[in-house]
Image: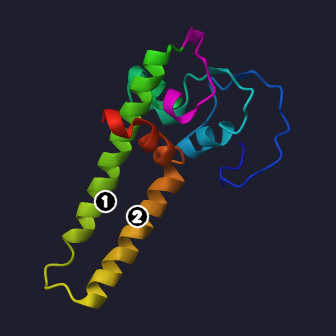
Amino acid sequence: VVPADNEPQQVEFSSMELLQLAGNDIKAWTDIDAIASFSSLTALRFRNNPITSVIGGGEARSTLIARLPNITELNSSGITEKERVESERRYVASVARELLTLSQGEGKETNHPQSSQNEDDTDKHSEKIRQKIVSLHPRFDELMNKHKDSM
């Protein structure tokens, strides 16, 4: 597993174009995000992993496409520009819903009048939620900016 700390690192597989991850024990999307740093990677084979066992095949494909900007082939099937755009938009919408759900959850905890201190606490909490989302979804800001006019 490649570290997913989003820190710049020396890539040792600079010419790797195809990666076979089918039938592995990948349980976290952060492991997938980590391989996005392999800029020469254009083809991925990714089936039968725990991370995708709880979602449908279409959702798994869409999520992988959105999280991996350089791949042009997934599970031996080409990725069209239209499919990439739709996958990225779907991903942004999903992450935005997650962010909204977390943000609304914080609002339910404070049913009293807002003071300056409460507003500061709410702002800090909102920033923590945003940081959590960005750490779990490193392409969110990039894709949100890319597709903001069409969403």
Q: Residue at x 48, y 62 (%)?
A: 131
For badge 1, the amino acid type reads Leu
**Secondary structure at numbered mark 2:** helix
The quarter holding residue 77 reads top right
Q: Nearer the viewer, residue 146 or 88?
A: 146
**Is 147 rendered above or below residue 57?**
below
For badge 2, the amino acid type reads Ile
Query: Is residue 62 among what the camera can see?
Result: yes
Q: Position of residue 132 (x, y in %)?
A: 47, 60
* In the image: residue 142, left or right of residue 2: left
**Mark 2 closeness class: few <14, some 14–19, many ≥20 residues within 10 Å:** some
Residue 137 included in the magenta stretch of the image: no
Q: Residue at x 70, y 39 (%)?
A: 37
In which quadrant of the rendered image does the N terminus lie?
top right
Q: Are marks 2 and 1 in contact (CB under 8 Å)?
A: yes
Pointer 1 residue: 102
Q: Residue at x 72, y 44 (%)?
A: 2
Q: CA distance from mark 2 to mark 1?
A: 7 Å
The coloring applied to the image is rainbow
Q: What span is in magenta?
A: 65-78
**Is 99 rendered above or below residue 125?**
above
